[in-house]
Amino acid sequence: MNDGDLAQLVGLRHKSFIVRIKQGGELQTHRGIVRFDDIIGKPWGSRVRSHLGNPFYVLQPALGDLLKELPRNTQILYPKDIGFILIQMGIGEGQVVLEAGTGSGSLTSAMAFAVGNSGKVITYEAREEMQKLARKNISRLGLEDRVEFKLRELTAEQGFDEEGVDALFLDLPNPYDYIHHARSALKLGGFFGSILPTANQVSRLLLALRQFDFAFVDVCEVLLRYYKPEPERFRPVDRMVAHTGFLIFARPVLLENTNDSIDDLEEGGEEDIED
């Protein structure tokens, strides 16, 4: 580990802390003080002790660990949803991704991590205080060079400044009001995504997606259950992270003529899988 690294210190009962390792610094906990000078130069996975003798393991934090520790003023997306969003929307190295509704920046951070140094995330937020928090969180993760922030509210008349982007995600309470803007900003065949808390909102979004020629629509939820890692009493933990929102995905397509219909593509059945 080097001076300036982000590290995860995991103590007894898996209590963990995300810290920036700095020479001369320290972490004060109820189990004692961990001095960073005792950590610098050691390999990841090493065990150190606090001044009270309590053990801490020093690990390189996963992205999910970092996102869970971000300061927030609003409900953030769960890592289980974020991971599925990135995969479902094909977000990867070198892509340009649009987001509306930055919030605390958890999804923004994950997208910035995924697009790499050659990609870019452009994120719109209407609330200045939320954008300030997101900037701080993303800077803490060292991803600020991959993100362009825009402080502006979308309206029915004014949409995105960009065109031809690879993917677009709307984290807004009324995404159905901006689907025409999403259509203009996305490249043909690009990836659209959104998250909504209620079925009524989902229904309105589905109608808007069909109106503006989005096809191959998927609606789903992600349920995550952990298990106790005990060989002799292997069973689910007492609680699970179940429904956190409806995820909606779609692709903008080009119809050959005015007689074509999106309904022809959406039969409501499961996808056929060839052997």
Image (spheres, rainbow, N blue to C red):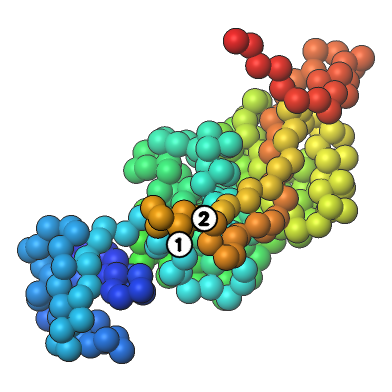
In front here: 225 or 7?
Answer: 225
Task: Report the mark closest to the observer, 2 or 1.
Answer: 2
Task: Choose the circle earlier in sequence order: 2 or 1.
Answer: 1
Q: Secondary structure at mark 2?
A: loop
Classed neighbour count for the residue bearing mark 2: other residues with Cα under 10 Å, few (<14), some (14–19), many (≥20): few
Neighbourhood count class around disc 1 (C-alpha, 10 Å): few under 14, some 14–19, many 20 upward: many
Residue at 47% in and 65% down: 68
Question: What's the amino acid at mark 2?
Answer: Arg
- Is residue 165 in view from this perspective? no
Instruction: From the image, tell me which residue sits under label 2.
Output: 235
Q: What is the secondary structure assignment of the residue under circle 1?
A: helix
Q: Is residue 30 visible?
A: yes
Residue at 51% in and 46% down: 83
Q: Position of residue 218 (x, y in %)?
A: 72, 35
Residue ID for mark 1: 67
- Quadrant in which residue 253 is drawn: top right
